[in-house]
């Protein structure tokens, strides 16, 4: 049993509390939207029901990542990046046949990046993809000898690797952060904090946008994104960040700033993936989550909020 569950988990009341809250919110939302769907079978209610099902999938994944043996958690995150990268390359209409060898090297970079995160090799972790792979991928493309549209491939593949692997790997690295005196939740608490806030920010922005949304932000990219939804979601996320700061070492001010950062960066990640899907004529990045698209559709906000959150926390509390 100790292999599958961290012995400290049973002693960590903060982590147990937030997991209970997450499950409670999901149960309440499931029952509420089911009841509303019976009386008001309108498209927005059906979309909320679909989103709730996808939230169950993602919540289960990230909760397990906090309670299972660390090695299993890192493998799970690696598979998450693998699927997200595969979805992104699969929908891209600009990938050339000549790019396949470079894509193979991108897949090989995934276990390396997560191994560095698992071992806590901070310096190598931060340069492997942004520097080493950013040099290696263009070189692999060059030696193929086909220069037609090579500059586009040199831009697309490293960006896809950054978005789906480098960014998401910061969630896993949270589990490798050293212990801080007086901070009981540790990396598991930080992981649940960023995931819960980012996912709730998506919910809050969608809900406020549905209720009050009138002024569109980027109508040609994501027509459902409104200033009312964005600002309402941001304020609600900042408020929630204050109440669950027990999962972090943050002061009150730091927790409020963190909530603001997560709300803004989560929005950025969402619209970036929306733009990519529009460019490639797709509604979703995949079909792995029934009724609500692919993995990348669910972690698009985390692709931006995760690294911003990681370096914010790291420089506040862990940098020497």
Image: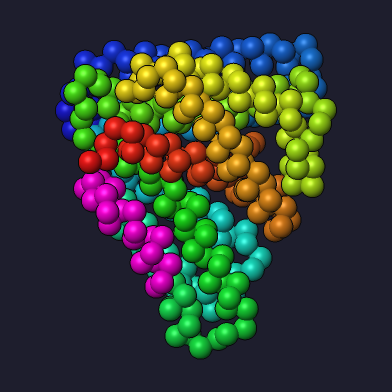
In the rendered image, the residue lying farthest to the bottom is 145
Judge by depth and name the residue closer to the eye, 38 or 309: 309
Along the viewing direction, whichever of 234 and 319 lies nearer the viewer = 319
- Which residue does the image show at 56% across and 72% down from the upper left? 153
Q: Is 59 drawn above or below residue 22 in the view shown?
A: below
Number of marks: 0
Residue nearest the viewer, comparing 252 with 215: 252
Residue bounds of the magenta highlight: 115-136
Magenta-colored stretch includes residue 123:
yes
On the picture, is 149 further left or further right than 162? right
Q: Position of residue 298 (x, y in %)?
A: 56, 38
Residue 291 position by quadrant:
top right
Q: Position of residue 134 (x, y in %)?
A: 43, 67
User: Left or right of 199: which side holds 178?
Assistant: left
- Residue at x-position 41% and y-position 60%: 130
Image coordinates of residue 166 in percent, x first then y, are 41, 52
Q: Residue at x 45, y 13 (%)?
A: 243
Figure check: 172 above or below 258: below
Name the residue nearer the viewer: 196 or 32: 196
């Amino acid at each position: 049993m100790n292999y599958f569950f961290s012995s400290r988990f049973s002693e960590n009341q903060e982590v147990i509390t937030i997991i209970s809250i997450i499950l409670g919110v999901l149960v309440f939302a499931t029952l509420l939207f089911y009841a509303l769907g019976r009386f008001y079978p309108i498209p927005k209610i059906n979309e909320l029901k679909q989103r709730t099902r996808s939230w169950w999938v993602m919540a289960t994944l990230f909760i397990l990542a906090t309670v299972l043996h660390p090695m299993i958690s890192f493998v799970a995150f690696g598979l998450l990046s693998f699927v997200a990268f595969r979805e992104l390359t699969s929908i891209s209409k600009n990938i050339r046949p000549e790019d396949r060898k470079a894509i193979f090297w991108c897949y090989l970079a995934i276990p390396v990046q997560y191994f560095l995160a698992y071992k806590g090799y901070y310096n190598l972790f931060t340069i492997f993809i942004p520097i080493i792979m950013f040099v290696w991928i263009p070189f692999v493309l060059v030696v193929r000898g086909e220069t037609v549209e090579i500059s586009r491939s040199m831009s697309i593949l490293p960006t896809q690797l950054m978005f789906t692997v480098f960014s998401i790997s910061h969630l896993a690295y949270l589990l490798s952060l050293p212990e801080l005196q007086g901070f009981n939740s540790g990396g598991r608490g930080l992981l649940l904090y960023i995931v819960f806030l980012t996912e709730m920010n998506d919910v809050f922005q969608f809900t406020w946008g549905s209720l009050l949304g009138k002024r569109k932000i980027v109508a040609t990219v994501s027509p459902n994104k409104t200033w009312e939804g964005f600002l309402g979601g941001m304020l609600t996320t900042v408020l929630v960040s204050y109440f669950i700061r027990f999962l972090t070492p943050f002061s009150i001010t730091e927790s409020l700033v963190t909530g603001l950062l997560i709300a803004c960066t989560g929005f950025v990640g969402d619209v970036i993936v929306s733009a990519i899907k529009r460019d490639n004529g797709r509604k979703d990045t995949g079909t792995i989550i029934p009724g609500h698209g692919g993995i990348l559709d669910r972690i698009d906000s985390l692709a931006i909020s995760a690294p911003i959150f990681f370096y914010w926390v790291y420089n506040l509390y862990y940098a020497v």
